[in-house]
Image: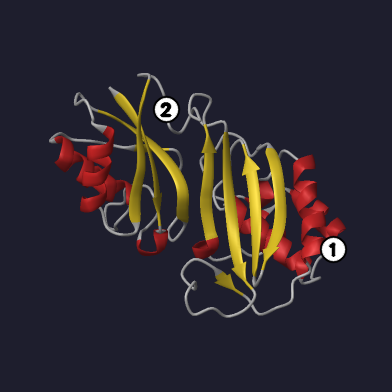
Amino acid sequence: MRYFIQFAYNGTHYHGWQYQPNAISIQETLNKVFSTLLNQEIDIMGAGRTDTGVHASKMFGHFDTNVVIDNAKFIHKANSFLPNDIVIYDIIPVHENAHARFDATSRTYQYHISTFKNAFNSEINWYTPKNLDIEKMNDAAKLLLNFNDFQCFSKVNTDVNTFNCKITEAFWTKEKESLIFTISADRFLRNMVRAIVGTLVNVGLHKITIQDFIQIIESKNRQNAGFSVPAKGLFLTQIDYPYIK
């Protein structure tokens, strides 16, 4: 049987989602707990790869087992075995060909910036004391929906066949002393969101103009885009599937 799991994690103390031979990852941690509880080797396929230090408030993965899982009991037991910074929310039986990565139709990320020093959220927000022009940043963010090729925001050495992504929303909101950037697309390139945010911050600092922002995208050159903001402010917040509500 194939199951989807819905879970969340604080990525501060992990080297990303994917298994690494010499570092602790989310995938390895979950595999060990699930293998122990189901008494068989379990290999969870994640919906995507989050980098070192990146968080997820809503992440999915799938795995196969010949054990019929009692949802409530298994979730309770798994959460008691898992460290406090990883939590399972749901176990969902799906058809045998369902795929957590390839069946996803949309993903949403949020990036959190603190504009005032906070003693309690420094692990999950990037703090900058500089004044950012959120109106200009929103003007630039809207323009992302007019483009398809985002090579300028991708890591240079990456094994993808295309740099095309369909962005469906991109906007900034202000909540008290925080700025939150929300972006949704059918797919994302490696480091894409952090590079977009860094470039939009340069717009907000008036280091580059809206026209400069357009020219950066059209250049398809990562060297022309802005800096990559720290991983700790980035959250994967939503993944959509045609068969999961």
Q: Image point 53% across, 48% down: which residue?
A: 237
| In this rendering, position of residue 38 left or right of residue 241 | left
Decide: few, some or many residues near mark 2? Use Cα within 10 Å; few <14, some 14-19, many ≥20. many
Name the spot of residue 6 as percent of width and height, x first: 40, 40
Q: Residue furthest right?
A: 211
Amino acid, disc 2: His
Name the spot of residue 100 as percent of width and height, x first: 43, 32
Q: How is the image coloured?
A: secondary structure
| In this rendering, position of residue 194 left or right of residue 232 | right
Which label's residue is closer to the chain start, 2 or 1? 2
Q: Is residue 46 above or below residue 224?
A: above
Name the spot of residue 25 as percent of width and height, x first: 32, 53
Q: Residue furthest front?
A: 72
Q: Secondary structure at mark 2?
A: loop
For the residue pair 26 and 56, the one nearer the viewer reads as 56
Decide: few, some or many residues near mark 1? Use Cα within 10 Å; few <14, some 14-19, many ≥20. some
For the residue pair 235 and 149, the one nearer the viewer reads as 235
What is the spatial separation of the Cα atoms under label 2 and label 1, in whole angstroms?
A: 42 Å
* Res. 209 mark: 1
Name the spot of residue 120 as percent of width and height, x first: 47, 75
Amino acid, disc 1: Thr
Residue 126 occupies quadrant:
bottom right
Q: Is residue 39 visible?
A: yes
Q: Which residue position is annotated with label 2?
A: 99
Q: Image point 69% across, 40% down: which residue?
A: 167
Q: Is residue 49 visible?
A: no
Q: Is residue 105 above or below residue 205?
A: above
Q: Image point 31% across, 25% down: which residue?
A: 2
